[in-house]
Image (tube, rainbow, N blue to C red):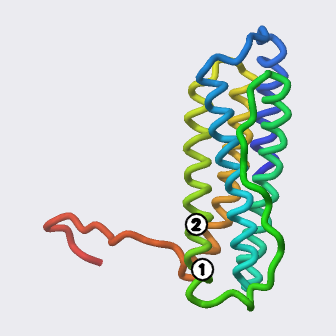
Amino acid sequence: MPNAFQAVINYIKSTSVEEDPKQNPHIGEAMGCWLYYTSIAEEIPALETCLNTTTDNELIELLTESKRLAEHQKLTLEKFMIKEGIPLSNTAQSKPNSDPNNIPLGVKSTNDEIANLISIKVASNIMMCSTNMTQSIRNDIGLMWARFYAEKMIFSMNLKNTMHKRGWLKIPPYFHPPGAPRS
């Protein structure tokens, strides 16, 4: 699946980005970069805290992948922002590794809570990417958001499947219209 997204991005890049006159990012593009950068940079220590809290191997894999993706997007965005003169925000420091078995139960998050925290962060990231994509005038900036969006969507599919399988997915009650047969 990621190859299909990459093929579309490569096609768009080859046809439109090179012809796009380089203008300074407008204020909406700059603000979108700053907000997403801040969100991703603050997400990384939260993911590290979660990694320090759980011993569940499947959840550790999800957290590690989410952290890797966040670090990759943060670095990509950081390079872009520095090149374009957009200031970086001050962000939290990384968390040191600790033993999850030494965390008191009243402080320790459950695996369900951790999985749903990741889910909320990913949903927020996807919304920010789609908003920033629609506000972008420059094609290179729009493509950056499209790539980030696609990466987060692919990750979210794996996350959702794992959450469903493990019983962590919060499912609202099913809707049954009045008068409709219940099956």
Q: Which mark sits nearer the N-terminus, 1 or 2?
A: 1
Query: Callout 2: 10 Å neighbours few (<14), some, many (20+)?
Result: some
Residue 158 appears in which quarter of the rendering? bottom right
Left or right, 126 with respect to 183, comes to: right
Q: Residue at x 64, y 61 (%)?
A: 157
Query: Callout 1: 10 Å neighbours few (<14), some, many (20+)?
Result: some
32 or 143, which lies in front? 32
In the rendered structure, which amino acid carries the disc numbered 2? Leu
**As displayed, is residue 58 above or below residue 66?**
below
Residue 36 percent across, percent down from the top left: 65, 41
82 or 156, which lies in front? 82
Q: Are marks 1 and 2 in contact (CB under 8 Å)?
A: yes
Residue 81 percent across, percent down from the top left: 78, 29
95 or 59, which lies in front? 95
Q: Residue at x 71, y 39 (%)?
A: 89
What mark, if any, has residue 165 been given in the picture? none
**As displayed, is residue 31 above or below residue 110?**
above
Q: Which label sits in the foreground, 1 or 2? A: 1
What mark, if any, has residue 109 been given in the picture? 1
Disc 2 is placed on an element classified as helix
CA–CA distance in space, label 1 to label 2: 10 Å
Residue 86 appears in which quarter of the rendering? top right
Per the image, the residue denoted by label 2 is 117
Residue 177 appears in which quarter of the rendering? bottom left
Disc 1 is placed on an element classified as loop
Image quarter in which the C terminus is found: bottom left
92 or 79, which lies in front? 92
